[in-house]
Image: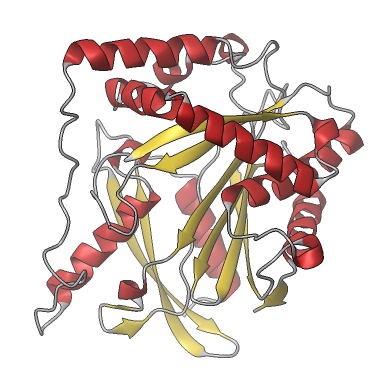
Amino acid sequence: MSSPDARHVELEAELNAPIEPRREPPLRFSILDYAAETTGPQSALVVTWFHPLMDPRGGQNFLAHLAHLDQIDGRAPWGGAPPAFVSDPDPRPLKERGRLGRQSQRYMRTLMPAPPVSPGTGLTSPGRARFRQETFVGGDHGTGGVRSTREICWRLALVGKTMGELWSRRGLPAVPFLVPISVDLRPKGEPGATFGNVLAFHFARFRPSETADVSSLTAALRRQMTDALRDGQIDANAVAMEFLAYRPLSLMLRDLPGTARRETFSFNCADLMDFPPVLEKLFGRRVVNAYHAPSVLPRPGIGVFFNRYGIRNNLVVSWIEGAVTEDEVTRIVEVVREGMAWTRIR
């Protein structure tokens, strides 16, 4: 039986073993047994997939489908029939969807006056993919107890603060940050489709100099999101993603500023929200925690990700060796923990 440290090594090995969908199934399963100091023997179910197959919410749905098949009493995991495996096709005519796709393309070309800069900029020999996962409790509000920390705009602003510090220490150019924020298109409160990326994207933009005041930056990011919804830009981006499904990543990114220089974004940030309570038991075992550890591209080279399981708040930092150091990752974790008013648990 391996130790938790050995488990982490195995998980990082998964991040460094890309799936080639033309030669292998787009989904892998591993079961890792390990000994935890406080709780004794445990097992970790590791699900690794090729990103176009499904988004993280789809991954949770997939586990729920499997759990449903495993249940001997026949209970449906959603209190009724499971959701569809794939979304219904967009009912709008091709001419209208084509117009929206072109609108998104034009928008992508005007996102920033200058290509983004990232910790991975100039990295000629990227190292291994790495990640760190920490679990915390507490802290429903941010600084001063005013702003709820459950919304993505606050969390992005807080992560932006950590990146502003990193940019200052590194002496990186003060080019505005460009960060893609996923928008789940599933009906609110419903599990939605399992397969495919049921996502649109909003592209947040702000300057490193704007990150010191987290509350003000949160308000600005919220206004950006509201404007993008009002102007139909997020819908247009979703239609463009549909046209690009399963296409090469280079084609998907070709209209972004800086893609010619192989730059993508300044950093990644996402919040997967609450892990579904229906999965509190899986294959006859009680689930004690669950988190998502995404792989990031060498450029930007780093991403910060959130999710919640019960009272446990999970923070995952994924990075590429050479883009940032272990000490810099530690600093990011501590700034986020302090800003969220969280207490670390093991």
Query: Of all residues shown, which one is farthest toward the front?
Result: 230
Please name the residue shown 72% across and 75% down the image.
343
Q: Nearer the viewer, residue 221 or 168?
A: 221
Is 304 drawn above or below residue 19 in the view shown? Answer: below
Q: Nearer the viewer, residue 24 or 95?
A: 95
Please name the residue shown 36% across and 21% down the image.
248
Is 7 drawn above or below residue 174 in the view shown? Answer: below
- Can see residue 127? no
Is 140 drawn above or below residue 191 in the view shown? Answer: below
253 displayed left or right of 47? right
Q: Position of residue 179 (x, y in %)?
A: 61, 32
Q: Nearer the viewer, residue 60 or 94?
A: 94
Is 343 drawn above or below residue 114 in the view shown? Answer: below
198 displayed left or right of 111? left
Question: Residue 206, located in which quarter of the rendered image?
Answer: top right
Q: Nearer the viewer, residue 227 or 61?
A: 227
Q: How is the image coloured?
A: secondary structure
Marks counted in the figure total: 0
- Position of the C terminus, as image quadrant, is bottom right
Q: Position of residue 288 (x, y in %)?
A: 46, 80
Q: Position of residue 30 (x, y in %)?
A: 35, 63
Q: Position of residue 33 (x, y in %)?
A: 42, 77
Question: Residue 36, located in which quarter of the rendered image?
Answer: bottom right
Please name the residue shown 81% across and 35% down the image.
210
Question: Residue 101, located in which quarter of the rendered image?
Answer: top left
- Can see residue 328? yes
Please name the residue shown 83% across and 45% down the image.
213
66 displayed left or right of 226? left
